[in-house]
Image: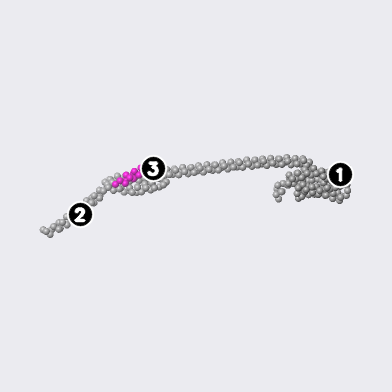
Amino acid sequence: MNTSIPGRAARSKALGAAAVAYLVLAGCASVPLAPQGAADARSKLTALQSNPNLAERAPAAIKAAEVAVQTAEQPVSKADAALGAHRVYMADRQVDIAVANASTRYAEDQRATMSDARDRARLDARTREADARTREANAARSDAAASRAEADRARQDAVDLQKQIDSLQAEATDRGLVLTLGDVLFATGKSDVQVGATSNLNKLVAFLNKYLDRKVQIEGHTDNVGSHDLNQGLSQRRAESVKAYLVQQGIAATRLTAVGMGETQPLADNASDSGRQQNRRVVAIIENPKPLAAAAK
């Protein structure tokens, strides 16, 4: 009788342990758990909320998704598993809607930004074109004004030149301006310029000082009285005397050429006193200015 007591105690202990284990398993089976998929919905929502391009662009939809995810994360019992799955599905859809709304708004903002950039670029291009046209117009006006000023200067120069020619009483020819000084510059048979007979020479000096590009050929002429050699020498000396006078007045010698023509080019018949007087002369030929193209060579 006493030997059976330990066996019964062991069996009772085993039965108690089994009962405890059953109760524990039964209790675990009835504890509510978060539905499967709720964590994935939360992860998608967190990614959306962390995206700097999307997080601020659909606040209402993101708020609704947050509420739906919080609801889906609520634990449910095994008996309510279908309810939990539905909540997870709705939360997932709400997150997708929030992502779609935010992405759409982002795309719209990008298009608006690009449109603004295109508008600014077009405006800048039109502004540059307008500025270019304004500069071209201003340049054209400046060119026109410069052309008018140049034309005015040319007209004034022509007027001044004509006044100088009139003052010299010179004749315009293909060779240049021809100024005939006559024989009053010299005493009979002499080659020295007479004092008080330099009025026309001084006008020539004034002209040459104004038009520094002009050169002068000075030609001495005589009548046929005397020998050819005598007349040739006298005409050369008279031409040289006129050149020397001009140099004394400051005209560069390089601008002057003296040539004795003797009796070879009479203006009138040497048979009369008046004819011979016309033939006794000094002629200054002021050359025409060279064209710009020729001067540049």
Q: Residue furthest bottom?
A: 3
Q: Is residue 293 above or below residue 8?
A: above
Residue appearing at x 29%, y 47% in the figure? 75
Closer to viewer: mark 2 or mark 1: 1
N-terminal-most mark, 2 or 1: 2
The residue to which callout 1 is attached is: 276
Residue appearing at x 38%, y 46% in the figure? 49
Residue appearing at x 37%, y 47% in the figure? 46
Q: Give the amino acid type for the residue marked by disc 1 in the picture.
A: Arg
Residue 67 falls inside the magenta stretch: yes
Q: Is residue 210 rendered to the left or right of residue 60?
A: right
Instruction: Determine the CA span between mark 2 and mark 1.
Output: 171 Å
Percent from the top left, x then y, of residue 226?
Answer: 88, 48
Q: Is residue 127 rendered to the left or right of residue 68?
A: right
Disc assigned to residue 17 = 2
For the residue pair 180 and 2, the one nearer the viewer reads as 180
Residue 178 in view here: no
Mark 3 nearby-residue class (10 Å; few <14, some 14–19, many ≥20): some
Q: Give the amino acid type for the residue marked by disc 2 in the picture.
A: Ala
Which span is picked out in magenta?
63-75
